[in-house]
Image: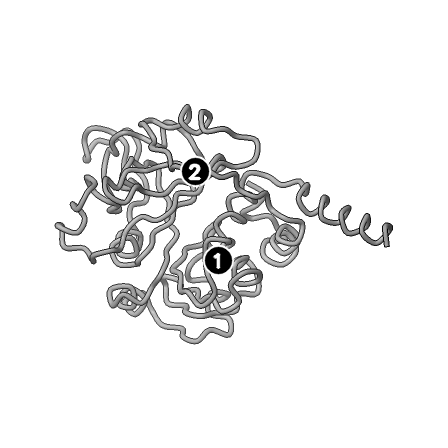
Amino acid sequence: MVAHWSQGLEREVKETMAEYNTMELMICTAARELEDGASVGVGTGAPCAAAMLSQKTVAPNLLILFEAGGAGPLIPEMPISVGDSRTTWKALMASSMPEIMETACRGMLDYTFLGGAQIDMYGNLNSTMIGAEYQKPKVRFPGSGGANDFASFCWRMMVMTPQDPKRFTEKCSYITTPGWLTGGDSRAKSGLPLGAGPYKIITNMAVMDFEPESKRMRIVAVNPGYAEKDVQDNCGFELLKAKKIIENKPPTKHELDILREQIDPYRYVIGR
């Protein structure tokens, strides 16, 4: 009896002490945010890995959609683009971008994962340019793609990004993708769907959400090995804090095994 209990405890300790890198931590944290039966619009890379991991762990009935047209695929392994044939493997539908964006406009997408070069305290994203002049930027980025549409019409927008003061900036050089705009009820007044907007920001250090009234970003959880001060020191604006800030659980061995062996065996994403 004692030996059996001891073996069980040893397995549990190993589960919680599994080694992982920053990208794996963010993917596992994001995967746990999706509930069974929800729908999520994703691109490739870390958001796709998070959706795949969620489907293989906590949300087996998660409906995954890609902006290029794949809806409800059983993705065999990591696709390299939103038009990759793997995004329509055993899918419910192989359509095109207009159908997917129409689905979002009709309010049928619960979540989306996005990213950008800059994010401000209200969750607005910039993936267009850095600089004072649009025609003569210091840096030019790819632009919106489907990000503006997804952020405008999906009910809950999540962002996966490293914590960095240059990325978390007081003011974006350009707003490619709307967050809560200037806070308060400004998003609703703009004509965007009432209740839709930024939900969670997932970084290597913490998880943030948005205070319900002001819509300002606030810390709700910190990752293992980090403190609230680390998060604030790596942010270009003042973060609010939830009344109770929890510590996120690290990735389990089970999650990491699936991520490394089934989802991204060639380390396209988790090897970064």
Check the image and report above or below for 176 versus 112: above
Label 1, on which residue?
51
Give the image location of residue 25, x and y in percent. 55, 43
* Residue type of the residue flagged with mark 1: Ala
Quadrant of the image containing the N terminus: bottom right
Q: Residue at x 27, y 67 (%)?
A: 98
Give the image location of residue 198, x and y in percent. 31, 48
Label 2 secondary element: strand
Q: Is residue 143 left or right of residue 88?
A: left
User: Callout 2 environment at 10 Å: few (<14), some (14 to 19), or many (20+)?
Assistant: few
Whichever of callouts 2 and 1 sits on the residue coming sooner in the sequence is 1
Distance from Cα at disc 2 to Cα at disc 1: 27 Å
- Judge by depth and name the residue closer to the eye, 69 or 9: 9
Q: Residue at x 45, y 56 (%)?
A: 81
Q: Is residue 97 left or right of residue 30?
A: left
Label 2, on which residue?
244
Check the image and report above or below for 207 versus 136: below
Quadrant of the image containing the C terminus: top right
